[in-house]
Image (cartoon, rainbow, N blue to C red):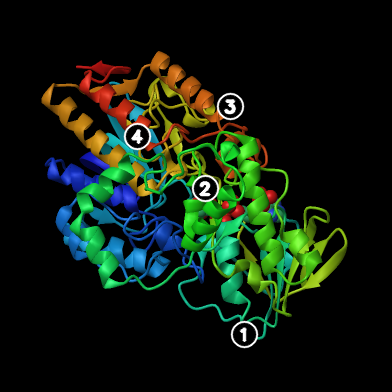
């Protein structure tokens, strides 16, 4: 049985919920399908202890509805996973979206019918949806990666991935635990497990730069202050590279004399969060400048961690600060001062296999009862390529993207008409406050769909020329930054065999917003429109 719709939205996280709401406002017959048991997307799945957003609550929230943003009260400076999930559930109720969302529905394939100008979308349960518009709000970090360590099936204890955490509480009391991976998820979970575990081994392949969050309850005064000037607050965010506002010194870091420069870093260390990365205007473009911040952060690790050998292992080397995502967490380094916590350097002695009783590395065996994989995601392209997507002339997305993703504005792919991507590769996405990016994308897609319908346009796709130019532009922008110099998931470097291409748009939110707006106001330049 197939269900016919105007539009199908895949995913009910930040992007999908907003998209559904906008298309309903346009009067379209629209449905969202969601693989999870609840709305929330990333914030539904990543429910490991300590899961928290690294951007502040007011920033990491929708701006599209004035009443929504004024009535919701965040309880902490940085929102925890349960609170964000409550917020997204509130949004689903407030805008009456639930009856248009089908949960526990994973899309497996989508095929474009050129003659009828419509998509046929199949689910794991063999349902079919027919829709003119297909909007992929599948998330950038929604396909977890579990490395293919041999022997995992023989392990007699329990193991979990942070991005697929059980809904019931996992009790670590008195257990020997290994956490594999020290990205944001690993860092957050480590300080939560350490107090309960009998022993915790933190298996680190690459030491990460971690800055304090200084999380705290959000006081009513701060909340009132933001709400009194929400318009200005949102505008400043949209005018900022990351889609959230930080105070930046006027002069480049390299031109700022000591001790003024260190004082600027110290102030931001005390403020907490990603503010450090925005301290000077050239930190993301000049490696010498970036080195000054790296030196500052390395000294902090030495100060906090008591054991010099442990501090040395935890000290990142060989890549600029921010080239791998800067991690925000207050307790991580001090957790290694506990007698029951050890860092294991698996860069020098890699994991060989999982045994029945633990983890075997090149130089030893670690007996554990629980393994927590905090090994990240097949980011940006993974969630899309995990679906068998076929466009015009039998073109398969996985073939088209074999050498890396190609999009126009991150929103559209040539030969895949009427398919739009929210916060996809080629958009600022994970390189920005992703909520600002999803809102820009959703609003832009909604307006384009309205334009198509008002003008009798049945199909729209990126032209190959516009797509090529955009891909070239995205590459060019990234090479002017420090981003491509680290083995990060931004580049696909964490997935064996994945093409090494810097995927997000590194030009910042203001430039991206301007370009998308110019494309729309010029009658959708770069799109092939079929009437
Ligand atoms: P990340 O940031 O991709 O971190 C994954 C971690 O797992 C990282 O330390 C990896 O080391 C490590 N890893 C990955 N594969 C392996 C293998 N095969 N062996 C050993 N260690 C491995 O994912 P997160 O979930 O922490 O965070 C993702 C984003 O979510 C985050 O940036 C925020 O935006 C929210 P590596 O650095 O690759 O050497």
Q: Position of residue 33 (x, y in %)?
A: 32, 51
Q: Residue at x 23, y 18 (%)?
A: 522
Image depth: mark 4 or mark 2 in front: 2
The residue to which callout 2 is attached is: 277
Residue found at the very far right of the displayed protein: 363
Disc 3: CA contacts within 10 A as few (<14), some (14-19) or many (>=20): few
Viewer-side residue, 30 vs 452? 452
Label 2: how many Cα within 10 Å (few below 14, some 14–19, many 20+): many
Q: Quadrant of residue 517?
A: top left
Q: Residue at x 31, y 37 (%)?
A: 134
Expressed as whole percent of the image width and height from the top left, the position of residue 376 reads 58, 53
Going 48% across and 33% down the picture, which residue do you hit? 506
For disc 3, the marked residue is: 403
Q: Is residue 418 visible?
A: no
CA separation in Å, label 2 and label 3: 31 Å
Seen from the viewer's position, the closer of residues 285 and 257 is 257
Helix, strand or loop status at disc 1: loop
Image vertical order of residue 223 relative to residue 118, above or below? below
Determine which of the numbered discs, if any, sits on residue 510 in the image.
Answer: 4
Locate residue 175: give its quadrant: bottom right
Q: Earlier in the sequence, mark 1 or mark 2?
A: 1
Q: Secondary structure at mark 4?
A: helix
């Amino acid at each position: 049985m197939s269900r016919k719709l105007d539009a199908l939205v895949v995913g009910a996280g930040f992007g999908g919920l907003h998209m559904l709401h906008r298309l309903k406002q346009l009067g379209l017959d629209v449905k969202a399908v969601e693989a999870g048991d609840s709305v929330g997307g990333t914030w539904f799945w990543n429910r490991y202890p300590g899961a928290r957003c690294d951007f502040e609550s007011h920033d990491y929230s929708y701006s599209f509805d004035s009443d929504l943003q004024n009535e919701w009260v965040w309880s902490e400076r940085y929102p925890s996973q349960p609170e964000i999930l409550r917020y997204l559930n509130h949004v689903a109720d407030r805008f009456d979206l639930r009856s248009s969302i089908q949960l526990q529905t994973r899309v497996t394939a989508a095929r474009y019918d050129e003659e009828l100008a419509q998509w046929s979308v199949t689910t794991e349960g063999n349902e079919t949806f027919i829709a003119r518009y297909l909007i992929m709000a599948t998330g950038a970090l929604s396909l977890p990666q579990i490395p293919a360590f041999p022997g995992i099936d023989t392990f007699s204890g329990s193991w979990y991935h942070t991005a697929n955490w059980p809904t019931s509480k996992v009790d670590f009391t008195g257990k020997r635990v290994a956490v594999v991976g020290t990205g944001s998820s690993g860092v957050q979970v480590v300080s939560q497990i350490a107090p309960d575990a009998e022993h915790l081994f933190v298996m680190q392949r690459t030491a990460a730069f971690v800055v304090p969050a200084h999380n705290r309850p959000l006081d009513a005064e701060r909340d009132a202050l933001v709400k009194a000037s929400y318009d200005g607050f949102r505008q400043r965010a949209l005018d900022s590279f990351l889609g959230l506002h930080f105070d930046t010194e006027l002069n480049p870091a390299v031109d700022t004399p000591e001790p003024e420069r260190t004082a600027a870093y110290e102030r931001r260390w005390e403020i907490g969060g990603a503010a450090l990365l925005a301290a000077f205007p050239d930190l993301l473009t000049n490696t010498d400048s970036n080195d000054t911040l790296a030196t500052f952060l390395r000294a902090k690790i030495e100060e906090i961690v008591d054991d010099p050998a442990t501090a040395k292992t935890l000290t990142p080397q060989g890549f600029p600060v921010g080239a791998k995502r800067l991690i925000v967490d207050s307790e991580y380094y001090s957790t290694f001062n506990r007698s029951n916590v050890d860092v294991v350097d698996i860069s020098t002695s890699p994991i060989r296999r999982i045994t029945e009783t633990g983890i075997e590395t090149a130089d030893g065996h670690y007996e554990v009862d629980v393994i927590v994989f905090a090994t990240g995601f097949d980011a940006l392209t993974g969630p899309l390529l995990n679906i068998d997507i076929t466009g015009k002339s039998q073109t398969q997305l996985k073939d088209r993207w074999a050498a890396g993703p190609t999009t126009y504005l991150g929103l559209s792919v040539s030969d895949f008409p009427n398919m739009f991507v929210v916060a996809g590769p080629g958009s600022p996405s994970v390189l920005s406050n992703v909520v600002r990016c999803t809102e820009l994308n959703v609003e832009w897609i909604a307006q384009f769909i309205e334009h198509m319908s008002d003008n009798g346009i049945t199909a729209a796709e990126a032209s190959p020329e516009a797509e090529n130019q955009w891909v070239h532009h995205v590459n060019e922008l990234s090479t002017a930054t420090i981003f491509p110099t680290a083995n990060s998931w931004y580049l696909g470097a964490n997935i064996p065999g994945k093409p090494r291409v810097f995927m997000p748009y590194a030009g910042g939110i203001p430039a991206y917003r301007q370009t998308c707006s110019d494309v729309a106001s010029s009658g959708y330049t770069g799109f092939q429109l079929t009437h």
